[in-house]
Each structure stands twice: as C-alpha cells, then as structure tokens.
Amino acid sequence: MTKTKTVLNIPVQALSMSETLDFIKNRIDTNEFTQHVVVNAGKIVSMQKDEALRQSVLDADMINADGMSVVWASRFLGRALPARVAGIDLMLELVKMAHEQGYKCFFFGARQEVVEKVVETFNQEYSPEIIAGFRNGYFNDNEEEQIASEISKSGAHMLFVAMSSPKKEIFVNKYKKLMNVPFVMGVGGSFDVVAGITKRAPRWIQKIGLEWFFRFIQEPRRMWRRYLVGNSKFIMLVLKSRFNNGSS
C-alpha cells in the first residue's frame, strides 16, 4: 500500500496528484479493487458523531485530503501531507486518463438530467468510447442488485458514485464483488460541477484554500452552519489533538 500520514486518527494518503494517478492506474491495470474516498473538514467533524460514516471512510482502500484545511492541519500536527488532492480535480484527471488509456467509466448518482449532462460533456470533450454507462442515484432497495449487475455488464474500469456518505460506501461494500469494477470513487457534488449547476471558485481562490468561502457566499443560508460552525469545530479538534493528545 502507499505511504500514509495519520491525521486526526485517519490514514490519509501522503501523495501528490500525479502520484495518486500513477497509483490508481497501477491498481486498474493489475485489476486490484480500490475504493477511494476524500475527507475535508466538514466530513471529519461529522465522523466524530456518525459512526456509520466514520467506518465507511476508514474501510476505504484509499483516502485523500480534499480540503486545504486538512493539509494545513496535517502540517500543524507534524504529519505533513504533500498536497491537497481535490475530489473533483481527481475525477477530471481520471476521466482524461480513461481517454488516454482506453478505460471505460460508469457514472452513477445525482438526478437523471444531471448525470445525462455529465455524460454529454465528456462525450464532447473526449469520446463516447470512454462511457461504459450511467444511471441516476434514485432507486429502491429491491433495485440495488439489478443496478450492480448493470455496472458489471458495462465493463467499466472506473465507477464514479455521486451519492451521500455512508449510502454510497454501504452500496459499494455490499456489491463490489458483483460489480467487478477495479476502481470506485465517491465524488460528492462533482457531477453538479461538471453539469454546470454548481460554479467552482476561481483557481487562485482554490490555491489559497478559500474555496469553501466562495461556496458560502453563493449560498449563505444553506452553507453557514456547514462552514462557519463546522470549521470552528474542526479547528477545535485539531487544537485538542495537538495539545491534549500530541500530534495524531
């Protein structure tokens, strides 16, 4: 397995974006199953009380730091991560890799019109050849096995799942053998970004770690608790880890 750094009791990959891509490519080429998740400040705070979410993250084969706050915390705690590997950026790089390497991608989640727009966008940017299939994220329990079978028959090398945690991790853990996809990644709201529904912060704002503030300004009523309250709790977790428990 790759090198990791333990940040707030979470084993996070100490890899750059290019190293992450190389590792994933190797896993796909050797057909080794890999379930990937990302963590940011909000998810780490939620993990403190949501045991199902916490376990779903810790059960993953690969964990990347999605937010700059996690990278900063790692440095403050003496467990420095080399870089942020944002989920949306990783997904876009992996789709590009699929085009270059002849892989196929299955897109699973979000509303029907959103996932259709995602597929249309990648068809135009690359080629229909990279699309193994797609399906929206609304289904009943009795449809799960059929969906997993559909993914298996698609011949996908990568599965991108745009559903909330731990719902997506529970689905993947339950059907990973049936789906038989080498690489599975939870992508949160990335489909909305690709479809043009959610606007990302300019690159310079991303680089200084204020992408969360850009989203807060766009939707203050919906995001204030998540970011202002959540970020405050994250800072307290980091300080507690540093001064009460040491760098962990």
Image (cartoon, rainbow, N blue to C red):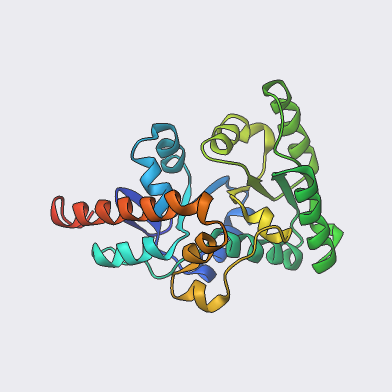
Relative to 215, is 83 on the left or the right? left
Residue at the image point whose x is 38% and y is 63% from the top: 69
Residue at the image point whose x is 48% and y is 62% from the top: 212
Residue at the image point whose x is 60% and y is 33% from the top: 171
Which one is nearer the viewer's eye here, 222 or 9? 222
> Which quarter of the figure has residue 112?
top right
Q: Where's residue 239, x and y in %?
A: 21, 56
170 shown above or below 11: above
140 shown above or below 8: above
95 shown above or below 201: above
Residue furthest bottom as drawn: 204
> Which quarter of the figure has residue 35?
top right
Q: Where's residue 223, x and y in %?
A: 50, 52
Relative to 226, is 164 on the left or the right? right
Q: How many marks?
A: 0
Which one is nearer the viewer's eye here, 26 or 38? 38
Residue furthest top as drawn: 142
Which one is nearer the viewer's eye here, 41 or 127? 41
Q: Where's residue 188, x and y in %?
A: 58, 49
Relative to 248, is 231 on the left or the right? right
Q: Where's residue 143, x and y in %?
A: 73, 25
Residue at the image point whose x is 66% and y is 59% from the top: 193
Residue furthest left as drawn: 244
